[in-house]
Image (spheres, rainbow, N blue to C red):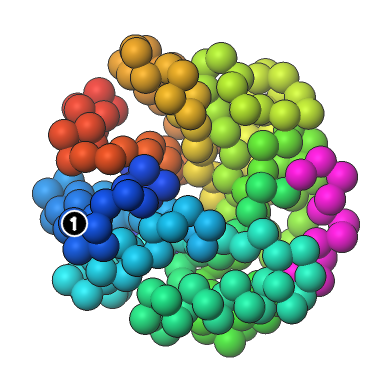
Amino acid sequence: MAGIEVSQVCFGTEHITQAAPEFGGALLAEAMRLYGVNFWDTDNSYGSITQVAAALKTVDREDVVIASKTYGKTAEEAEYDIKRTLAELCTDYVDIFLLHEVAAGSLPALMPALSVLLSAKDAGVVRSVGLSTHSVQILSDAAEIDGIEIVCAPLNYKGIQIEEGTLDAMLGALDKAHNKHDKGVYVIKTLGAGELASDVRRALEWVLQYKDRIDVYNIGVAFLSEMRENLEIIK
């Protein structure tokens, strides 16, 4: 994805925030060692940076891919979030850094923050720059922006948490980003933020139909047993 080798499944860390750092770190490390899930998605606001930092102490840094994000609306805020993430993870670089939850109509105002992320890439402290959004229109617009290499958006069969557009429109925007503009794509909310958890198989089998426009599936789990069950369905 965007020149970075990643597992098809991403370990979303939002659900391990209540775990002690060492326990949460062990979950991440074991997911990599046992199942090859080497892509860990975190965020300063999730509260899982400490768990990811603990995991990094037990693995080789180059064996894992870490995504983090900024809600920064200004250059100063974005720069602060990059420095804070590097310091709290005790790492020299973050593999993927995203403008996070970009809302409808807000993208033009975020160009200074995007410039900071691109400068961080030039400096080698970020490997790839991207954007996450729940908005179909923002995703479509981001696909056309040079410098944005990765996009992240919700996708599930009920269209839960998709904004400013329909489920079909989101599928079209993902296709545009991946196949027309060569962006890396990973999707979130595959289980509808828990609303589809009563039938995980149906939810995952539905979203797997669209591998032609998706590189990675971010599936939030709290236990390795959940990870194993999800991977069995995906395989």
Q: Is residue 44 above or below residue 207?
A: below
Residue plotted at (63% across, 78% down): 80
Residue plotted at (28% across, 40% down): 222
The kind of residue on which mark 1 rests is: Phe
Q: Where residue 204 sits in the image (x, y, percent)?
A: 37, 22
Q: Where residue 39 sits in the image (x, y, percent)?
A: 35, 55
Q: Is residue 63 left or right of residue 181?
A: left
Q: Is residue 8 above or below residue 164?
A: below
Look at the image and give the residue range highlighted in magenta: 103-115
For this orientation, the residue located farthest to the left is 34
**Quadrant housing residue 23:** bottom left
Residue plotted at (17% across, 46% down): 35
Q: Where residue 152 sits in the image (x, y, percent)?
A: 58, 45
Q: Mark 1 sits on what residue? A: 23
Q: Residues within 10 Å of mark 1 (few under 14, many from 20)?
A: some
Q: Is residue 125 left or right of residue 225?
A: right
Q: Could you tell me what secondary structure mostly forms the magenta stretch? A: helix
Q: Is residue 228 left or right of residue 50?
A: left
